[in-house]
Amino acid sequence: MTLSKEELERYSRQLLIPGLGQEGQEKIKAAKVAVVGAGGLGSLVSAYLAGAGVGELGIFDFGPVELSNLHRQLIYRTGDIGTAKTELARKFLLELNPGVKINIREGLLTAANAAEALAGYDFIADCTDNFTARAAVNQACFDLKKTYAHGAVYQLEGQLTVFSPHDGPCLGCLSPAALRPQGDSCVKHGVLGPAAGAVASMQALEVLKLILGMETLKGRFAMLDFRLSSFVVAELKKRADCPVCGSGRAGN
């Protein structure tokens, strides 16, 4: 997949990076990435991926922009309140980079529809704090043998990892409780906007590194404490009794 003269100019600062170059940019252009969630994480992850030249993006979300979103969801404006995030995200991303194909899907991803919705994408970014969608993405990626970047943010804390559920630990291995209802942490406990931005930029980097075949956080779990400016990475291990990828799954 060759690059046009305009693309060579648009991505010229990326092309200078050792180990990326034109070959790496062509990999980015050929990639298809699903971004699940268009809120504090997903809105910025999708913007970074579109800006980097990912060839096809799928944006998955449900519901309109609300006033309380605007301190961290920076692709939306005050005049957008009441309009569906998916439509607004598509408009913003195409204005940012008209060379990227944008697909949108309005509605919650669930165990019943996630595999079908995500099947056409190479990689997935889990940017949702909705437990139903989070569990559905994890299960779908296990079933489809997809690798995905998982991010979450809470107050001044964040977490980040890369799951490859079919051949390594998954979200259920990290915490079976993460597959059960937890409530909406942003609504109940709050989040500082730049904390979401920091996690989102790192999550977008993990996706781009997956596309480029670079080392990622696969099999490792990053815990980010922005209050203390600390960054701890722990090894993840597959749980033999995991309800998704281990002996605890249905049918075993």
Image (cartoon, rainbow, N blue to C red):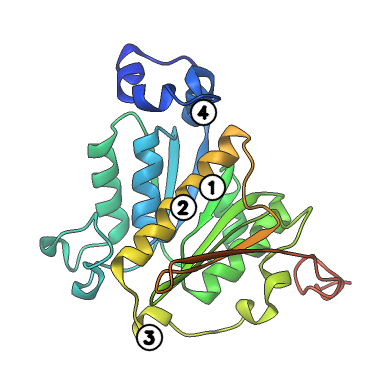
Left or right: 153 in relation to 7: right
Which residue type does callout 1 highlight?
Glu
Q: Which residue is mark 3?
A: 189
Closer-to-camera residue (106/41): 41
Of tags 3 and 4, which is closer to the observer?
3
Q: Position of residue 60 (x, y in %)?
A: 43, 57
Which residue type does callout 4 highlight?
Ala
The residue located at (39%, 58%) in the rendering is: 198
Residue at mark 2 to residue at mark 1: CA–CA distance: 6 Å
Residue 214, located in which quarter of the rendered image? top right
Q: Which residue is mark 2?
A: 202
Residue at mark 3 to residue at mark 1: CA–CA distance: 27 Å
Left or right: 114 in relation to 220: left
Which residue type does callout 2 highlight?
Met
Q: Which residue is mark 1?
A: 206
For residue 209, say whether it is visible.
yes
Q: Position of residue 195 (x, y in %)?
A: 36, 66
* First in residue order: circle 4 vs circle 2: 4
In the rendered structure, find residue 129 and report the number of the disc placed on it: none
Q: Position of residue 105 (x, y in %)?
A: 41, 55
The residue located at (24%, 45%) in the rendering is: 91
Q: Quadrant of the C terminus?
A: bottom right
Residue at mark 4 to residue at mark 2: CA–CA distance: 21 Å
Task: Kindly state the secondary structure of the residue where label 2 is placed.
Answer: helix
Q: Label 2: how many residues lie within 10 Å, few (<14), some (14-19) or many (20+)?
A: some
